[in-house]
Image (cartoon, grey):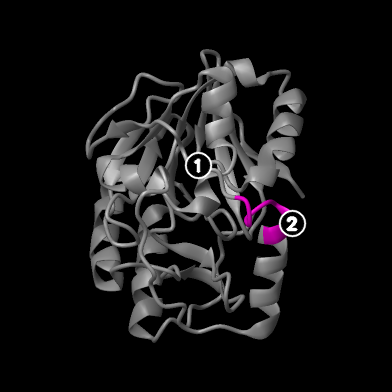
Amino acid sequence: MGAMELRPGLHRIGNDIVAAYLVVDDSGITAVDAGLPGHWRDLERELAGLGRSVADIRAVLLTHGDPDHLGFAERLRRDHGIPVYVHAADSARARGQGSTSPGWGRMRLGPLVRFLAYAVAKGALRPVHLAEVREVADGDVLDLPGSPRIIALPGHSPGSVAVHVPAVEAVFVGDALTTRHVLTGQEGPQPAPFTDDPAQALDSLERLRPTGARWVLPGHGAPWRDGVDAAVDAVLHAAADGGRSPQGRGRR
């Protein structure tokens, strides 16, 4: 499955392994994250199904600067003049000028192989960094479809953010949490792997609660539709239990 409508005005590209999102209204489209390079065809198919085109995309908002979220962002910027926004603390990361090497932690062979195979098939071996970005900061409300608001969530990376779009009752969290651990296959809200500062990442999750969002949308895992408080509580419980998350209820 390459795309799905979660609710009117809210669409996912990709799947539970790697996902990006579209917020759609009469003024155009805001893309949140850009998956992997090979998700370009999924993007085109989803736009065609909506009766829209790339020209309707007003911007790409990156939740952080890791390669599996950059995907088609530079292609949109370079070929179509679409701006790409990222938090200032991840600006260099998105431009390929800085990264870290956090530990992989727990893993199981089957899910690991599936993740790596999917990533390779979607172009992960040829990541395309940004030549130019526009920087955002905590609290910024952007004049884009959905009026997205930036919420700083440092931890996974220094410039990790959530993007809150009240118009679609959603908060996009990138890798601040996951609902499907790509290395173990464990489902349900839990800490994401490859996190620079796990303790800080957990502390940052409290900043999500005031959104009151129904949908919590991670870069990896099933969409969660049971509310932000339940998602954050589940992640904290999983972390206290050594990362063993209970089966989530958020699958569509």
Q: Name the residue carrying label 1.
A: 33
Identify the disc placed on residue 123.
none
Seen at 58% across and 70% down, the residue is 182
Tell me, yes or no, whether the two marked residues, 2 and 1, touch with CB atoms within 8 Å: no
Closer to us: 122 or 229: 122
Report if residue 63 is visible in the image.
no
Query: How would you rate the neighbour count of disc 1 (Cα within 10 Å): few for under 14, some for 14-19, many for 20 or more?
Result: many
Q: Residue 34: give x, y in percent of width and height.
A: 55, 41
Task: Answer yes or no: is residue 131 visible.
Answer: yes
- The residue lying toward the viewer, choosing from 209 and 103, is 103
Q: Position of residue 188 (x, y in %)?
A: 53, 69
Q: Amino acid at mark 1?
A: Asp
Q: Is residue 213 magenta?
A: no
User: Given the image, on which type of amino acid does mark 2 rest?
Assistant: Ala
For the residue labelled by badge 2, is the local secondary structure a helix, a strand or a loop?
A: helix
Q: Is residue 184 above or below residue 18?
A: below
Provide residue 209's location: percent of width, then percent of height: 29, 52
State the mark number for residue 121.
2
Question: Magenta region's main secondary structure?
Answer: loop
Image: magenta residue range: 120-126
**With 5 as the anchor, is 238 left or right in this view?**
left
Q: Secondary structure at mark 1?
A: loop
Name the residue at 46% across, 37% down: 130
